[in-house]
Amino acid sequence: MADENLSELSFEEALAQLEKIVQELESGRIKLDDAVASYEKAVALKKLCEEKLHSAQLKIEKIEITPDNQVSSSEFAVPEA
């Protein structure tokens, strides 16, 4: 899969590809040039996963029960990094 198509992957697909690359690199049975290319793709996949997680976090609503037992929701506060 070409790098320009990475953005079309779901989080789960990107994570599965990332895990496969890590296993290949850890095996030590990959040629140096292939290892470098795999590492570069792994970095792109990691960034994609982080972006998808951040996007999902922003969509989460915080559900609260008020003192008078009413249910309310508010935007999830994202802590500053």
Image: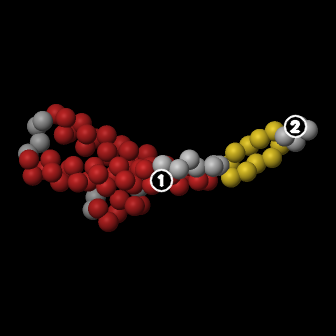
Q: In the figure, is residue 54 to the left or right of 59? A: left
Q: Is mark 1 on a helix, strand or loop?
A: helix
Q: In the figure, is residue 12 to the left or right of 32? A: right
| Mark 1 Cα-neighbour bin, 10 Å: few <14, some 14–19, many ≥20 | some
Q: Which mark is residue 22?
A: none
Q: Residue furthest front?
A: 80
The residue positioned 27% from the left and 62% from the top of the image is 2
Amino acid identity at mark 2: Pro
Q: In the figure, is residue 23 to the left or right of 52? A: left
Location of mark 1 (residue): 52
Given this view, does label 2 or label 1 mark the residue nearer the observer?
2
Tag 2–tag 1 contact (CB < 8 Å): no
Q: Position of residue 18 (x, y in %)?
A: 31, 45
Amino acid identity at mark 1: Lys
Q: Position of residue 77 (x, y in %)?
A: 63, 49
Q: Which residue lies furthest to the right in this view?
A: 68
The residue positioned 36% from the left and 43% from the top of the image is 16
Residue 71: which quarter of the image? top right
Location of mark 2 (residue): 67
**Number of numbered discs visible in the structure rendering:** 2
Residue at mark 2 to residue at mark 1: CA–CA distance? 35 Å
Q: Where is residue 57 in the image (x, y as percent from the top left)?
A: 56, 49
| Mark 2 Cα-neighbour bin, 10 Å: few <14, some 14–19, many ≥20 | few
Q: Is mark 2 on a helix, strand or loop?
A: loop
Q: 49 or 74: nearer the eye?
A: 74
The residue positioned 53% from the left and 50% from the top of the image is 80
Answer with mark 2 or mark 1, whichever residue precedes in sequence: 1
Image quadrant holding the N terminus, namely bottom left
Q: In the figure, is residue 45 to the left or right of 71? A: left
Q: Where is residue 59 in the image (x, y as percent from the top left)?
A: 61, 53
Q: 41 or 71: nearer the eye?
A: 71
